[in-house]
Amino acid sequence: MSIKVMLIDDHPVVRAGLRAILDSFSDIEVVAEGSSGAAVDRLFAPESLAVDVVVCDIQMPGVDGISATRRVRDNDGPPVLILTTYDTEADIIAAVEAGALGYLLKDSPEQVLHDAVVATVEGRRTLSPEVAGLLAERVGRPQQALSAREIEILQALATGASNKALAQQLFISEATVKTHLIHVYQKLGVDNRTAAVTAARERKLI
């Protein structure tokens, strides 16, 4: 019996290539496609699709891969394997926290993609070596590891947002923003916003 896949990617050419690769395996069949994370809503419609695993990109217009993963998780849907070009800590942590079981980079060999799909269906976590290394490094430096909220603040800092704007965007007080910034600066070993953003980008935190 073939593993039934829902494939979500906003680039038609990429999606076609991935479909061709997945369909080339005798034990995998792409039964549904989508160009945005909103496609996962079809899994929970009255006439729902029979899907064993969702293979999904992260950055897409409309509903992104992180939001789509949450939707699937919240509705007890099939496991999600993120397949993307983005390897920043912010994206990886967000995907894992959203409930993704696997995180693979698009430059992975075809057999690795096959094995990741199979492993995800079987409930085993699958990570690209680069992703696994980054998470292992994060675990190895717990005192320096930034929280999801601190990474969120760094992402906003990179847009040039003021403390007031940050507070409004994240629905927290300016005093809380300042406290988070102090912790971020300490963990990154910097003393200002520009240096914090530069360090975060160098370390692929954002």
Image (cartoon, rainbow, N blue to C red):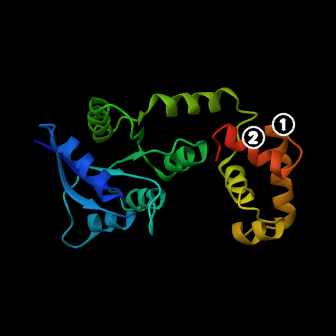
Q: Quadrant of the N terminus?
A: top left
Three-letter amino acid code of the residue under disc 2: Ala
Given residues 112 and 167, the one toward you in this image is 112
Q: Is residue 144 above or below residue 4?
A: above
Left or right of 135 in this view: 16: left
Tag 2 secondary structure: helix
The image position of residue 34, as x and y in percent, is 30, 62
User: As shown in the figure, which amino acid type bears the numbered disc 1?
Assistant: Gly
Residue plotted at (82% across, 68% down): 173
Q: Nearer the viewer, residue 90 or 17?
A: 17
**Distance from Cα at disc 1 to Cα at disc 2:** 9 Å
In the figure, 56 relative to 88: above or below? below
Residue 115 image point, x, y percent = 28, 32
Q: Which residue is mark 1?
A: 189
Residue behind mark 2: 199
Mark 1 is surrounded, within 10 Å at the Cα level, by few (under 14), some (14 to 19) or many (20 or more) other residues, namely: few
